[in-house]
Amino acid sequence: MKRLGISLPACLALALLFGATCVDSRGPQDKGARRGADRAADEFEKERRRMADGQLRAYGIRSDSVLKAMRKVPRHLFVPEEIRHLSYADRPLPIGLEQTISQPAIVAYMTEAADISKKDKVLEIGTGSGYQAAVLGEVAGEVYTIEIIPELAERSRKVLAELGYSNVFVRAGNGYLGWPEQAPFDAILVTAAPDEIPQALIDQLAVGGKMVIPVGVGDQEMVVVEKGRKGVTKRKTIPVRFVPMTGKPTP
């Protein structure tokens, strides 16, 4: 029987057709690198579980769907490689272009506060790294996310596509304007702080929907906006610190 010294995936296909015996032709360095990558992936998974079951529960996160999403989404793939060892620390991290990826507890808090279900259409303002969008993609039906910095929009679009988030749609644009052609939205999350809540986003929120948004200059507070048939209510929750929301309120 012929022994084939080609890549394993190709060899396995030929083996099924011709009865060949496969030989792994990868060298010792290739195998060592693969084992190292596997060990790193296992360690990151353990850290994600510790983050969800330890840090996030300590912060009061109780939603099963949110905790499941936080256990699943690989935060380390949304941060620069040189700081991946900090991926599951209880802190925000720089992602370049003077932007940050939010602290995991804040991502979980905002997702839980928005009370999202699998049938919901969600708008996110401030894609950044794409991590919050990925978490939303796990708990929502469709996610539309807008990033004002084109380089970040393209970077996050690529990572989200590589991870298989076909229900997350990324646009480079002005978040103050929302995404009117896809409105109304069952939930809206804003991950940058305006000095006041943009009226366009309130208009694009569905009746019965919630918006979670940091508001303020300097001192900021998270605000949960609920839209009912009789009007809009706003409830301040926790003090936060986000990058300022940029762009213009009007076209």
Image (cartoon, rainbow, N blue to C red):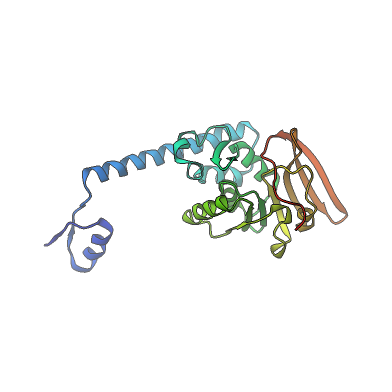
Q: Which residue is rendered at x = 24% and y = 56% of the image?
A: 7
Whether residue 97 sits left or right of residue 215 in the image: it is left
Q: Position of residue 91 (x, y in %)?
A: 58, 33
Residue that protrudes farthest toward the right in the picture: 230
Residue that protrudes farthest toward the left in the picture: 1
The number of discs equals 0
Near-viewer residue (138 or 218): 218
Can you see residue 62? no
Residue that protrudes farthest toward the bottom in the picture: 17
Can you say whether 185 is above or below 246 in the image?
below
Image quarter where the N terminus lies is bottom left
Whether residue 39 sits left or right of residue 144 in the image: it is left
Can you see residue 27? yes
Can you say whether 45 is above or below 142 in the image?
above
Q: Position of residue 15 (x, y in %)?
A: 21, 63
Image quarter of residue 154: bottom right
Q: Which residue is rendered at x = 65% and y = 56% of the image?
A: 173
Image quarter of residue 104: top right
Whether residue 134 sits left or right of residue 228 in the image: it is left
Q: Which residue is rendered at x = 60% and y = 36% of the image?
A: 103
Near-viewer residue (212 or 62): 212
Image quarter where the C terminus lies is bottom right
Q: Position of residue 67 (x, y in %)?
A: 58, 42
Q: Position of residue 73 (x, y in %)?
A: 52, 46
Near-viewer residue (26 or 98): 98
